[in-house]
Image (spheres, grey):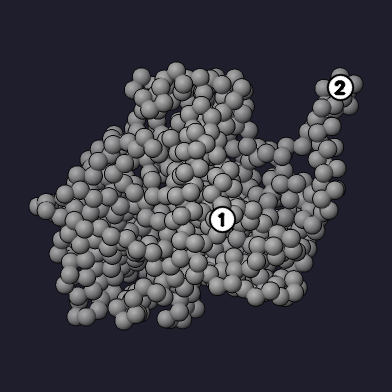
Amino acid sequence: MSTLFGWLRGDSADDPRGVALSMARALRANPGQACGMWTAGPLAIGLLEQADPVADPIERAYEPATAAAGRYQLWMAGEVFAAPFVEIRDVAFSRTREFRQALLDHVVDHGLTALGRMDGEFVIALWDGANRQLRIINDRFGGLPFYQGSSPAGFGFAGGVRGVLMAPGISADPDSEAIREAVTFGGYRLGDRTNVAGVKMLPGATAMSVVGNRIATEKYWHWTDIPPVARRPLPELVEEIDRLFTRAVDRRLSGAARPGQTLSGGLDSRAILASAAPRTARWTAITFGVPGCDDARYGYEAARVANATWVFYPLYSGGRSDWLLRRSSLVQPTDGLIDLVDLMHVDTLTVQVPLIDVHLSGYIGDLVSGPTFANVVDAESLLFQMPYYGGELGFPLDVARARMADTVKGLDGAAARFGFFTDKGPQSTNRWSAAWRPWLRVRKPFVDYAFFDFCQGLDVDVRVGGALHERWLLQKYPAFFATIPNQKTGMPVMTPRWRVEVERAGRVARRRAAPLLERLGSSRAPRMRSFTNDGVEWRRPEARALIEGTILRPDSLSCGIFGRERVRQVVAAWFDRLAAPTQVVGALYVFESYHQHLQAHLAQARAHGAFA
């Protein structure tokens, strides 16, 4: 998947192309990525993409569209699945100059309005040479994380923080609020914040304009633009949801030679498996976790029903601390924006790359068409769904409430649940899937615009009280959902609530009776609901020494922000099983590791010389 970056020179005398080349070196994660580079006056812009030996060179394949006798130039990274101004029969068409030309002609004539209906994950750079104006525009969901920073020397932009930091005058000073927010809100930062004060993330559906030293942003689309859907009988809604989802999956299978996914024991990834696998010649499903966990058992069953190739990736594999060393090596390539827990998603790349060329990702499906977050109606309820941790290092409740109130205010009248898509969503799904993109294409059927708008345009009580999500899956894909349990409950979907509660009570009773049964010689292996085992693996002596040594290092930024004794107590409490969520420790570790090694990482990129 392509990555865009560039440098718009301000009052400096630097060579913009040289700056852009240094960005390319910092951003390149896969040796198979080739670089294209273009200049237009003070602007140098580049694009990284996987090299294709039978295709045109990158600079030809991704050359800009032009209009008004060369006044306007437009580049685009990413893909588009549907657009209101041109027919897209094959997703590969959206990566052609012909598509970019149709897009540019439409934008010149009609403005940005149509982009709200241009379904895809993309970043656009539009240069107006007459006014020396650069515009950066992304998709609704910020599917391709994008960052920017400025200094008197100019304006830098890139698909990674490290790319922006290669530009002249962009400071790499840490942002202390980033770690404050991360230890407060489930490991996540809010809004446009990164770990570096001078670099910000571009929020979704944003058009940023840069003219000289003036930077302005506008939203070209709002959550309130989703039209309400008239009430219909549930059977009609099931049919419409399935039609829209099937179309979304079909579009995202376009051009896939080796399609696949990561498959959990939940419902979202299984819905993709059920819809996509029967329509492909081959399908690979990769489940990761600890051996014997629910995800492994349910994933295997679902893959067997689909006649798909099933691969199990055991977390924490290798030597006692190998897993931690692997995740630590991913901190710089992911800009320190994925905590130690969620870095497990990137760890599976070694398995995905040889097996999959197009990955269909199913995360947040239950939020789109199901009941998740439907009970979020104000800042207070959004706060605790982030989640809000509080604790010794977190914001006090009143401060955290104020942060969530700002998020809801920024929704311009849309329902508070959409705060997930502005604060948590871009981090919980987009950032680690972005780390896959240098090697393979990632596509997300659940955020297909037509599917998303239909589901979110329904009254909340239809999705919750009507159990629309579960009815759809059970009725349309019974072989995948009628008997194979949902990992969340251990029971199939639509199981009566009382049976779920009885099963839960039975599990509790069996767990309490386990010591007695073991003494009597009739013990059985307990159900392993969680696919992770952080509580054991992180506490092994060699892992604990590295985690604590990094967080509590002599020049620890976290200790300077919160106080060394407070940080030491929080970390010790977690390791001694007394308090503190795992994500707090994971966020502290990554924040410290990132800043400890950032300058060396950037220096290494600068020292590489010409891009090759």
Relative placement, left or right, of 460 versus 226 is right
Q: Position of residue 331 (x, y in %)?
A: 42, 38
Q: Is residue 35 visible?
A: no
Residue at image coords 64%, 45%: 312
Q: Position of residue 133 (x, y in %)?
A: 21, 66
Q: Position of residue 427 (x, y in %)?
A: 48, 48
Q: Is residue 563 above or below residue 27?
A: above
Q: Which residue lies under the disc numbered 2? A: 516
Question: How many numbered badges does the structure rendering display?
Answer: 2
Q: Check whether the beta carbons of the residues at disc 1 and disc 2 lie within 8 A of each other.
A: no
Q: Is residue 164 above or below residue 322?
A: below
Residue at image coords 29%, 54%: 157
Residue at image coords 41%, 75%: 114
Badge 1 density bin: few <14, some 14–19, many ≥20, Cα 10 Å: many
Give, as a three-letter code, the residue at label 1. Answer: Arg
Disc marking residue 417 = 1
Q: Secondary structure at mark 2?
A: helix
Relative placement, left or right, of 239 versus 176 is right
Q: Is residue 611 above or below residue 218?
A: above
Residue at image coords 54%, 49%: 379
Q: Quadrant of the N terminus?
A: bottom left
Badge 2 density bin: few <14, some 14–19, many ≥20, Cα 10 Å: few
Q: Nearer the viewer, mark 1 or mark 2?
A: 1
Label 1, label 2: how far apart the Cα atoms are? 46 Å
- Sequence-wise, the earlier of marks 1 and 2 is 1
Q: Nearer the viewer, residue 126 or 36?
A: 126
Give, as a three-letter code, the residue at label 2. Answer: Leu
